[in-house]
Image (cartoon, rainbow, N blue to C red):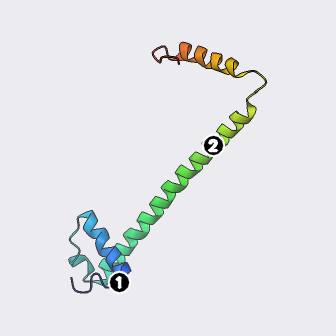
Amino acid sequence: MGGAFDSIPTSMMYTLFFLLGEWVTPDFETYTGIFLCYFQCFLGLIFFGILVGALSDLMSDILEHYVKFRDSLDFSHGRQYYLDKEKMARHILCKNIPTP
C-alpha cells in the first residue's frame, strides 16, 4: 500500500473502499480502477444531493403550510376555548389517549 495515504484525496479514496469492504489494491493498479472509484464517488455525491434536496423541499413545504395554519388561527377567543376544542377532538379521534 505504498503511497496510499500520502495525500488527502488518495486517503479518502482508499478509506471509501475500506468502508465498503472492498480489497483496494487491485482496483488502483490501473487508471480505469482510479477512474471507476472517482466515478462512484461522484455518483454518490449526486444521489446524496438529490436526497437532501428532496427532504429540504419537503420540509419547506411543511413549514409553509404550518405558517399558513398558524396565521389563520383566530385568537379572539380565550385560551380555554382552544383547550376545550382540543379535548373534544382527542375524545372523538383518539379515545385511548388520556386528556390532561
Quarter of the picture holding the N terminus: bottom left
Q: What amino acid does circle 2 point to? A: Leu
Circle on res. 90? none
Q: Using the image, determine if residue 52 lies above or below residue 35.
A: above
- Identify the residue at image location x=76%, y=27%: 75
Q: How many other residues sit within 10 Å of disc 1, few (<14), some (14-19) or many (≥20)?
A: few
Q: Which residue is at the front of the view, 38 or 94?
A: 94
**Residue 66, located in which quarter of the rendered image?**
top right
Closer to the chain start, of discs 2 and 1, is 1
Residue identified by numbered label 2? 63
User: Foreground residue, 9 or 75?
Assistant: 75
Q: Is residue 76 left or right of residue 9?
A: right
Classify 10 Å Cα crowding around label 2: few (below 14), some (14-19), many (20 and above): few
Residue drawn at (50%, 57%), measured in percent from left and top? 50
Q: Which residue is labeled 1 in the image?
A: 7
Vertical placement of residue 10 versus 85, above or below: below
Total numbered circles: 2
Residue at the (57%, 46%) spot, across then down:
58
Residue 84, x across and y down, in percent = 64, 16
Pointer 2 and pointer 1: residues touching (CB < 8 Å)?
Answer: no
Q: Residue at image x 64%, y 17%?
A: 85
Distance (Cα) linking label 2 and label 1: 43 Å
